[in-house]
Every structure is written in structure tokens, then in C-alpha cells.
Image (cartoon, grey):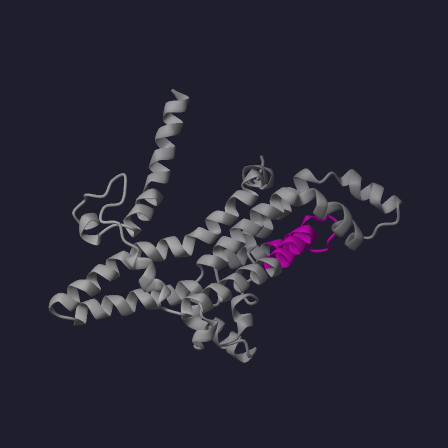
Amino acid sequence: MLYVWAAIVLLVVMYPLYFIIIASFSDPSAVGNGKVWLYPKGFTFDGYQELLKHSNIWVGYKNTILYTVIGTMIGLVVNISAAFALSRKELFGRKTITLFFIFTMFFNGGLIPTFLTIRDFHMYDTFLVMVLPFSVAVFDIIVARTFFQSSIPNDLWEAAQIDGCGHLRYYTLVVLPLSKAVISVLALWMAVGHWNSYFNALIYLQNKDLYPLQLILRDILITNSMQSAMGTGEAAQIAMRLANLLRYSVIIVSTIPIMCFYPMVQKYFNQGVMIGAVKS
């Protein structure tokens, strides 16, 4: 019964993704009429060919990869370091500092003050605005702090002190090598967040050469939808057909890279989440 139940859950989870894949290669009319179930019908590459006509899609890929890699690296340095500091009992005012961090999970300055702050720091419409201002994630800090407190024995710190280690050396040579599981989990969360991010780019970027992939794909969809709405006769039908195909093709193009990356860290995922979870 467990195997049957697991198979049903797997089917429920995987079928929507499989449907999007086969729909991106199928005739939109067949998809709209509910004729596509297990395999493509009216096989076509028109959706992908239309996407590839937009050369800026490669600019979007390059920008998104840079934002994801650099943003994830900055986020790991900032959040893991903050978590380690907050996990040390000898840190003066540790509980007060933690409360200040947690406070920001419920209240923030709002969009307009944040926009004005970013503009005053001369990061508006720059590469930095996508990787630096929003690098702190309090939830990630709490997960990593809990991991350090529950999984790194204090005896290691005492032994390191005997050997002449300071906090920085202990952090880099002892703590980080023992924290691969939680680091991998946080890296995955941050990478997915950066890859899917579009709102910050929508608000803080004007230069299209800095647009991430998600924003470029959004513009392509909007452009094709407008063309199909404004056209008449056969031209409108062709445009509508391409617009429907693009909806599925865009999802595949935007998710394939992150799906290829996920298996590399999946073995650490469950372990890291459980180790970093709050324990009673």
C-alpha cells in the first residue's frame, strides 16, 4: 500500500510538468480541446522557434546566471556568517540582535522608502541592485543558526581554543567543512529565488541589457498577446496560436536550468532541512 500511495503522489506531482512539456510541442488547438494527455499531438517546434527569434533571450540567460551565481555567493557569505555569530553564546547582546533580525520578518520600510534608499546609494539601474540590497534572508539565518547550535558540539570550540584558534579560524577551518548539508540547502533556496526573481528587476531596472530572463520572457509573452489581440482574420489566429504555444515554451525554457542543478544538491536537501529545523 505504501508503494501504491507513493506512486500516486509521484504521478500527481510529476504529471503537470510532463503535461507542460508535451503541450509545448503540441498543436495549441489540440491542447485547448483537451486532446493532449500522454503524448504530443500535432508535433511542432514553433513555440521554441519563436522564442529563439528574440536575441535578447540570451542576454537574459547571461544576466540571470550572473545574478544567481553572484547573488547566491553573497547571500551565503552574509547569512552563514551572521548565523554563526548569533549562535555564539559569548556574543554580547545576542538575544537583542536576534530580535532585531526577527522584527524585519514582520515589518519593513515599504516599497517607496526602499526605492529611495537604493537610489540614494546609487544602485538604481545597476548590476548591484539585483545581488546586494536583498541578500539578507532572516529565515535562512535562523535555520543556519539552529544548525550550528544543535549540530556543532561546543567541545570542538574548546579543543580549537587549546590549539590557538580564534573565532575566524574556527569558523573557516572547522565549522564550514562540517556544515555542507545546511549550506547546500541554503544555496538551493537562494539560487531558486534569484533565478525566479523578476519583481526587483521590474522596480529597480530600466536598462534592458540588465534584464533577467524572467522579465524578458514576460515581455515576449505580453508582446505576442498584444499582437494576437490587435490582429484580425488569419493573422490574428496565427498570433494567438503562437501566444498559446509560448506560454508552455517559456515555462520549459525558464525551469530547465534549475531542474538540472537540483539533483546535485538533492542528497543534502532533506538532511539539511531536518538538521536545521527547530527542535523542542
The answer to whether residue 201 is left or right of residue 84 is left
> Which residues are the magenta region?
75-98
The answer to whether any part of residue 68 appears in the image is yes
Q: Identify the residue shown where x is 88% and y is 44%.
A: 162
Nearer-the-camera pick, 13 or 58: 58
Please identify the residue farthest to the right as the structure is shown.
163
Please identify the residue farthest to the left as the structure is shown.
233
Residue 191, how many percent across, how many down?
Answer: 52, 55
Nearer-the-camera pick, 182 or 47: 47
The answer to whether residue 176 is left or right of residue 195 is right
Q: Dividing the picture into quarters, in which one does residue 221 lie? A: bottom left
Nearer-the-camera pick, 222 or 50: 50
Is residue 47 rendered magenta in the image?
Answer: no
The answer to whether residue 32 is left or right of residue 183 is left
Q: Identify the residue shown where x is 41% and y is 22%.
A: 2
The answer to whether any part of residue 106 appears in the image is no
Which corner quadrant holds the N terminus? Answer: top left
The answer to whether residue 13 is left or right of residue 139 is left
Residue 35, how many percent across, how many down?
Answer: 19, 43
Is residue 81 rendered magenta in the image?
Answer: yes
Residue 203, how many percent across, how many down?
Answer: 42, 71
Residue 259, how many percent across, how many down?
Answer: 46, 48
Q: Please give the count of numbered marks on the rendered protein.
A: 0
